[in-house]
């Protein structure tokens, strides 16, 4: 049971890190101009494009969705049913990591959250 409590703490910490950097943090100085992926007049351009140092609207939305995902993780970990969702967790972690390449500066900031989520997956219950 202590392992699951540690995993729950890791989930909460990683969620706080992701939410902070995607929704609360002030824009950071960045010389990396990796924010122009699609035409600005398209829906995908609206979701993914961002100015250097800012987070795209998709990142803001995903940061908020992470709170809901964290609540699910806590529920399954607390009730010793994490094995039922481990593969979903791995897939979501992989998708999140791939999407983080759209904003390298943000990726650097939330890397500890990815590491904490990976620890949740690989630490045996």
Image (cartoon, grey):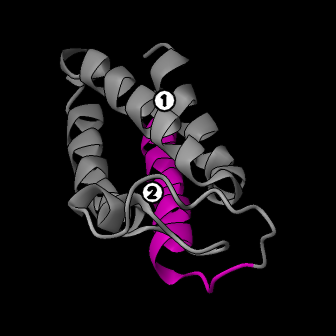
Residue with the mark numbered 1: 120
Mark 1 nearby-residue class (10 Å; few <14, some 14–19, many ≥20)? many
Q: Secondary structure at mark 1?
A: helix
7 part of magenta stretch = yes
Point out which mark residue 15 bears.
2
Q: Quadrant of the N terminus?
A: top left
Rendering quarter of residue 82: top left
Residue shown at 50% from the left, 60% from the top: 18
In the image, 19 versus 26, the foreground residue is 26
How many numbered circles are shown?
A: 2
On the rendered structure, is 78 left or right of 118?
left
- The span shown in magenta is 5-28
From mark 2 to mark 1, how far is it between C-alphas?
A: 12 Å
Residue shown at 22% from the left, 22% from the top: 85
Percent x, y of residue 109: 69, 58
Q: Is residue 56 visible?
A: yes
23 part of magenta stretch = yes
Say if 64 sits above or below 23 in the image.
Answer: above
**Are the residues at dot 2 and dot 1 in contact (C-beta closer than 8 Å)?**
no
Percent x, y of residue 22: 49, 69
Mark 2 nearby-residue class (10 Å; few <14, some 14–19, many ≥20)? many
Residue farthest along the bottom direction in this orientation: 26
Residue shown at 78% from the left, 71% from the top: 30
């Amino acid at each position: 049971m202590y392992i699951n409590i540690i995993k729950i703490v890791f989930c909460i910490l990683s969620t706080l890190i992701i939410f902070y950097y995607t929704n609360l943090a002030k824009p950071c100085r960045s010389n990396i101009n990796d924010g122009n992926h699609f035409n600005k007049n398209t829906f995908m351009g609206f979701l993914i494009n961002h100015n250097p140092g800012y987070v795209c609207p998709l990142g803001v939305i995903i940061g908020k969705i992470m709170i809901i995902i964290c609540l699910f993780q806590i529920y399954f970990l607390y009730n010793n049913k994490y094995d039922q969702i481990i593969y979903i967790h791995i897939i979501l972690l992989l998708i999140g990591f791939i999407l983080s390449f759209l904003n390298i500066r943000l990726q650097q900031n939330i890397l500890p959250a990815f590491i904490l989520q990976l620890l949740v997956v690989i630490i045996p219950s």
